[in-house]
Amino acid sequence: MEYNSEKKTPEIVNETLRIFKDYSKKRDSWAQQAKEDKEFRLGRQWTKEQAETLEARGQAPIVVNRIHPAVETAKAMLTANRPSFRCAPREDSDRKVANVFSALLSYMYDISDGRTIIRKVIDDYYVMGLGYINVYQDPKKDMGKGEVCMHDVDPLDVYVDPNSRDRFFDDAENILVSRLFSRDQAKKMYPKYKKQIDDANGEQDFNMPETGRDNDSNVFFPEDVGLLHEQSEYVRGYERYSKIDIQKIRTYEEFSGKEELLSKEEFDNYKKQPAWIIENQIITDEQQAQQIAAALMQQYQVQEEEAKAAAEEEMIQQGAGLEADSPSTGIEPPQIQQVTYEYLILKQIIKIVKIEVTRIKQCIIIGETLLYSRVLPIEHYPIVPVCNLHTRTPYPTSDVRMVKGLQEYINKTRSLIIAHATTSTNTKILVPEGSVDMKDFEEKWAQPGVAIPYDPTDGAPVTVQPSPLPNALYQNETTAKNDIDHQLGLYEMMMGNSQAAPQTYKATISLDEFGQRKIKSKLTDIEQALVRVGQVAIPLMQQLYSIEKTFRLVNPNNSMSEYVVNKRLYDDKTGEIQVFNDITVGSYDIIVVSGSTLPTNRYAELEFYMDAYSKGLIDRQEVLKKTEVFDIEGVMQRTDEIAKLNNALKQQEEQIKQLKGDLQTRDRESVGLRKKVEVEKFKGQLDQVSNKAKSAGTLFERRLDDNLATVKRQVSDASKKEGSPSGGKEAAKNRK
């Protein structure tokens, strides 16, 4: 929203131009040093006077840039991973929404190409002692819905109140960002103000400090390129940020839990908003109120008709005549009342408190024309500094500034060594005057095997050998290189020197971890700045993301997460519209997980997670997150399918094993049955034999009995024939 300043437009413009002029004078010395540091980092390390002096001596201005690889190594380490943002709810704010904000900050980092931005900022941090991150709302992104983004700012384009002492310049009265734009660039940036841009005064001065460094490195800066058009085609732009105290009214809606800070004008409009009280339920959305009211009326009509029908049926059963009055149902119609927010404030359903808050005022000026001004919903400057060696001024010291002397010594030493090597290869000869024909001597000296006559009376030519350079010169150069790395918090192994690495893997990991301690001190500066980025971004998100929005986030393990904010859901049971993940309310604290941007040993981390998985502390999905597997969901699905197939295979194997056991049992049972049949058969045969034996025995007994009976008869007959009783008895006794 545009802000109507209490000051007139000419006063704002004149004040801004005066501030820009004053701040520029105060920072000239620092800006010149920062420009020189930047040139050193990129290879501009000789002044024109130094280069001319060396060339006059026959030496080349050699540059052995040790600063560049050291800075690149530090950048690579400090930006190895995406920073991990964590939001914590303040007071009664929603914890789930806090997690959503954590994801939103990572989302802002991704859509802004945060890794590239942070790399640039860290480069400025090391080289110039100061880097800047600008957090802003881009209304053009996301199909015109807008996004909260961030980008880097050139420190030489930023002008800070010289009296500031705070690390984040919170005590600065103003912060200005100024640079030259072509008019076409300015019109694309501010399309609503084309006429004002055309009317703005032109300018040609880049307002950049001069260092006198030679440009043989082919490294260019804006002032080196120059302007492509006439002076009138360029305009200077000013972004001025200042802190103001404004009166705000804090509102708290008990029925929704929504809390807002409103200006007086916003509060006046707020009080006029309509609301509906339906069955003691407060509805603020007209369409929702109409839907709920229609549903309740329909429900009321159905209930009343049912009640009437039941009452009439009862009257008929009681014998009441047709002339009787229609019975009363006792059902009350739904209570629907349209009110305003002012009524809710009077009834203290909405509570208000008048407070004074600090806000950031932004003014955009082109040339001498104020395009617009507005108040941002933030209490911290959106230009977030990343200070290196803070000196309690807006002009910190850089690491490069501390090693420039070492770098110059390396360059001078190397130039001397090369010059000495050049002169050593060019043999110098002392020739007595008149002993040889100099023209003939010069032509033939370099030819192999040639004979050169000379007059021995005048003396023979003598070859002069140059004095060797002392070994200390080479040693000092190596020491200077090591000193630069040490100053920047690096060591040889971190620079990729495998010879400096220990022989064992664990020793290498330990050394690398210990070697990162100085880098971690730098990381603290960066993490504090990222915390401030989050503190600025969240209020901007709460203002911009006021409607339903779906955003997707690519996780570090390449999986995809989807979040929906401000989603309206209708509750069938209560008939209320609930806002899911309402990010427009609440206050939140921000932290950045320490060391989250530093490189991690993937193999050591994976080994740790594998050990935890083997002990049952985590599942395999957490293990997969620590791998470089892209399609984790596909791997999980395929793994589940393989597990199911393995289970089915095991079940089949168990069934086969069981069937084999059953078969063996049947075999044993069949053998037993066969033996049993044979036994029964044998028993049958035995019974046959036994029966035959019994039959034979019976027959023999019968025959024996028959024979005995025959004998008895014969004896009896014989006894009768003797005719005497005694004789018969005696014969019987003898038989016995």
Image (cartoon, grey):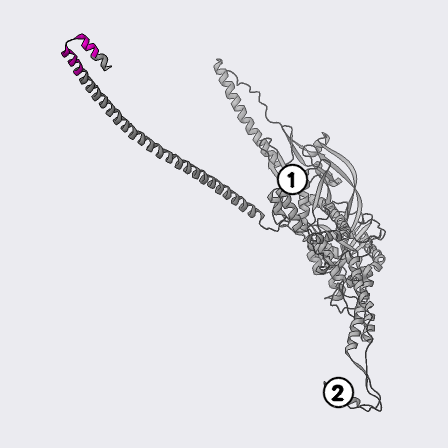
Q: Nearer the viewer, residue 693 or 360?
A: 693
Q: Does residue 165 appear anywhere in the picture?
A: yes
Horizontal and vertical percent position of residue 649: 48, 43
Q: Which mark is residue 581?
A: 1
Q: Is residue 185 left or right of residue 50?
A: left
Number of labelled discs?
Answer: 2
Q: Nearer the viewer, residue 107 or 319?
A: 107
Q: Is residue 529 left or right of residue 704?
A: right
Q: Which mark is residue 593?
A: none
Q: Circle 2: is it few (<14), some (14-19), or many (20+) Cα within 10 Å?
A: few
Horizontal and vertical percent position of residue 334: 60, 27
Question: Furthest-top residue in view?
Answer: 725
Q: Nearer the viewer, mark 2 or mark 1?
A: 2
Mark 2 and mark 1 residues within 8 Å of each other at the beta carbon: no
Q: Secondary structure at mark 1?
A: loop
Q: Nearer the viewer, residue 67 or 643?
A: 643
Q: Circle 1: is it few (<14), some (14-19), or many (20+) Cα within 10 Å?
A: many
* Residue position for label 2: 443
Question: Which circle's residue, 2 or 1, is located before the other in the chain?
Answer: 2
Q: Nearer the viewer, residue 176 or 415?
A: 415
The amino acid type found where label 2 is placed reads Glu
The amino acid type found where label 1 is placed reads Asn
Q: Secondary structure at mark 2?
A: helix
Horizontal and vertical percent position of residue 79: 71, 53
Q: Which residues are magenta?
A: 714-730
Quarter of the figure with residue 222: bottom right
Seen in the picture, residue 114 relative to 403 is either above or below; the reply is: above
